[in-house]
Amino acid sequence: MSLKNTIDFLAHLRKMNGFSGLSGSGGASEAASRLTETSDFGTNPGNLRMLSFVPEGASERIPLVVVLHGCTQTAAGYEVGTGWSALAERYGFALLMPEQKRANNPNGCFNWFVAEDIRRDHGEAGSIRQMVEHMAQHHSIDRARIYFTGLSAGGGMTAVMLATYPDVFAGGAVIAGLPYGVATNVRQALKEMRQASPQSARALGDLVRHASSHRGPWPKLSVWHGTADSTVNAANADALVRQWLDLHGLPEQPMVERKIDGFPYRAWRSASGETAVESYTITDMAHGTPLGRADDEQFGVAGPYLLAAGISSSYYIAEFFGLTGPIQRKKTAVTKSAPRPERDVTEVPAGRAKARGSAGARANQAPPRDRRGFDVNAVITRALTAAGLMK
């Protein structure tokens, strides 16, 4: 890789380290977060922090979603920024949000490119697996409904966990991440982030097949990436899709092409008709997690790498995982959600998709109060006060 590319990339990392607020440690995000920490969950070979959220009154067997933050972010900041705890409380599933320590990576990145950290039962992958097991044993998690998602380096580590523990996770979602196994050191990681791997779909699939003794079935996968991403080249999304299409034995030609909330969407279905792989292309979006409205609510708060794009990735990922069904209100009563308005989609034969409506028009609408009487401004004010940033 050229020296210029290396210097440009390191300069970008330095700029990332200058961010604060939601993506930094402490502050308002820590005060507003619903996460609680567990210190004793296993041998913790990767030296990570375990934070989690379990909604009150949840049923005895509930799904679990593991969510990983990106570089320079914290678990609490990413939880508040993406709205995952609001979704967990609304639909009755548990959250596990591991957090990187600066001692492991000075930028707070999960080490998706370090050989010792991406092996089954070793390093950071081993620590996260221990956290999942702890959650399963202490919160009666439905082991058939454990899912994984993450942003950037967290997205890269999402691919690692799906590859090394395909027997544990039913599905995953990678936001601005990379395929599993394309880098095992820093130099390779920088190269892959600049220019996606040219390996064939079969070679990419073999990287996953060699990560464990598992031979299928494979977790389903949702891939999200912005076309203006200058940190992780958007071609990595296509490489990741090809890797998992090979695992599922599916052709590269999508079976569905349409637009959702104004953005290109592709899907590949299994023989049973279930979506096995899907891909969202967020046009003109930079590096980060796309935020927006869904089901008449705003999920998340914009900040560094938390981008108001006009589409809620958190909601649609939860929907892809099958978690947005009946709303969990109390342990003794489950209330069905009101029918949602038709999504902004048009499904047509591949290559002939057209959009209906405008994502920009939706983005300009004022966010309503939460249906449960949740006053967003009041919560933000309390958080800033608790953080010492407001009197």
Image (cartoon, rainbow, N blue to C red):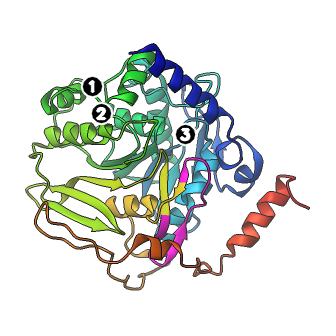
Identify the mark nearer the N-term, 1 or 2. Answer: 2
Percent of width and height locating residue 105: 58, 24
Amino acid identity at mark 1: Ala
Percent of width and height locating residue 192: 35, 26
Q: Which residue is mark 1?
A: 211
Percent of width and height locating residue 14: 63, 28
Identify the mark nearer the N-term, 3 or 2. Answer: 3
Would you say residue 331 is visible in this rendering?
no
Would you say residue 264 is visible in this rendering?
yes
Count neighbours of disc 1 (C-alpha within 10 A) and say few if under 14, some if 14 to 19, many if 20 or more. Answer: many
Percent of width and height locating residue 291: 50, 60
Determine whether 55 is above or below 152 in the image.
below
Q: Nearer the viewer, residue 46 or 152?
A: 152
Spatial CA span between label 1 and label 3? 22 Å
Q: Are marks 3 and 2 in contact (CB under 8 Å)?
A: no
Q: Which residue is mark 3?
A: 98
Q: Which residues are magenta?
A: 292-306
Q: Residue at x 61, y 60 (%)?
A: 301
Q: Is residue 293 magenta?
A: yes
Question: In the structure shown, which secondary structural element does the residue marked by tag 2 occupy?
Answer: helix
Q: Quadrant of residue 315?
A: bottom left
Q: Are marks 1 and 2 in contact (CB under 8 Å)?
A: yes
Q: Which residue is mark 2?
A: 163
Locate the N terminus by quadrant: top left
